[in-house]
Image (tube, grey):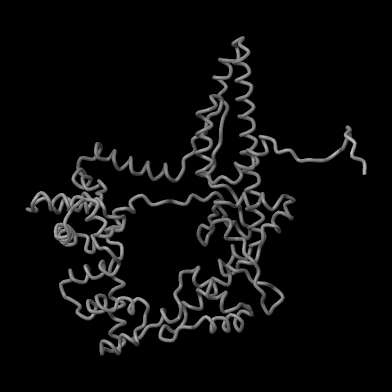
Amino acid sequence: MNLKAGLMQQQTVKLAMTQEMSQAIALLQYSTQELQSFLEDKELENPLLQVKKEKTLTDIFQSKKSNNKNQFDKNDDNWIEQLSSHEQTLQEYLHSQLILIKEPLRIKQAIEYLINSLDENGYLPDNHHLQISNHFSRKEIDHALWIIQSLDPPGVGARSLQECILLQLKRLEGRNDLAEQIITEHFTLFVNKKWRELEKILGVEIHDIQKVFDFIRTLNPKPAADFYDSNPNYIVPDIIVVKENSNFKVSFFDASLLGIKFNEQYYQQFSSYKDQMVNHFLKDKKQEYNWILRSLEQRKETLLKVSKKIVEKQIDFFHNGPSSIKPLTMKEIADELDIHESTVSRAVREKYMQTSFGTFELKFFFSSAIKTNSSEDASAQKIKALIKELISKENKKKPQSDQELVRLLEEAEGVVVSRRTIAKYRDQLGIPSSSKRKRYD
């Protein structure tokens, strides 16, 4: 073996990740919101880069709010109605009910602390923790809590779901003794639908327990949730698919398009300076602008190509809906577009497509294949749609078990799946087991 030190030449091929390539990859996987934040940050760093301010859904909703606000000045007839436009917080609402309360200062302090401890659903943490952390006596805490629980919305100040339901039951004009007894003494058996046991314990008919169940479902498990839902999140679709005659047109949603423009005035103003550092700065910032511009164009082009290919491969979905979705992998799309599979993965990340059947994340259209008795495989999404449809049509007094669903899918659709797969998909759909779907009336 030759162990002598020496110089030798070897030729290898390597792919170097340039700054431009790295940036293009990053921009491709950004959602619309992430891209907007990125461009706004770059606008602060680069004086040659200006973000084109396209109108987004958020702007549209804000403009509607501001238009309503401006009506106060323009239309004097509506000023009384506009006084109620202030969105009241839960704490403000509770305090408004305590204006005339006459209690010792110590109790008022305990009430104040408890109100500020409420979570977004109107629940309170454990009393013991509150008692220790604020040096209130158990008697003071209990009295303050009793006052809060007598306020609206009913159920506020509860320390558990069981207590929340019980508080609401006790506030009803016509008291439901059976419901109160079940929630107070047999809550676990009730929620787990072990109603045969309850029937024997209580000596009542099972359809009476069913009536209690139906009534309890009309109550609010989150009494304060309405005070925290005033700013809903809106999904802004990136792609819109519209049917034109027998074809489908795939295009970008205008509000989701983000762009940049070159600040020519700034560039001309400072490029006339005979300063080497200034010229070097301008050169770097112009190069950065060009990189970002090309990355944005590449992002747009890739996303549009991938979206068009999805429509092409899932054409039955766009004609008939989710039940007609087919198995599709990102590798199939990548191979047909002659790009890497990771590029497709980045392109569909947190991007949404608006269709005539609703708005779906692009990842929705990719689903693994499940074997069928026919020559054509079914997708996981299609199986979920079929399970949902079968359960919606079942006899609620005799709901289908997971094993029965296995049989029905094989007989009706030729789909071969295991009972465990049915259970997994049912859980993902938020559908309870057959024993918990059963009705007794």
Viewer-closest of 182 and 41: 182
- Residue that appears at 56% across and 45% down: 30
Q: How many marks?
A: 0
Quarter where residue 289 is shown? top right
Horizontal side of 102 relative to 136 (left or right) equals: left
Is 219 situated left or right of 61 in this image? left
- Residue 192 placed where, x, y %? 37, 78
Residue 343 percent location from the top left of the image: 67, 49
- Vertical arrangement, residue 279 with respect to residue 43, above or below: above
The image position of residue 33, as x and y in percent, is 50, 44
Residue at image location 61% in from the left, 82% down from the top: 410
Residue 350 x/y as whole percent: 54, 51
**In this view of the protein, which residue sits in the foreground, 363 or 106?**
106
Image height of 197 relative to 355, above or below: below
- Examine the rendered structure and indicate whether residue 9 appears above or below residue 416: above
Q: Which of the pair 39/162 is nearer the observer? A: 162
Quarter of the image where the N terminus is located: top right
For the C terminus, the quadrant is: bottom left
Closest to the observer: 394 or 82?
A: 394
Q: Residue at x 72, y 52 (%)?
A: 337
Please, which residue is most extreme toward the right here? 1
Asked if residue 263 is positioned above or below residue 61 in the image, the reply reads above
Which residue is at a point 61% across and 77% down the rendered structure image? Answer: 417
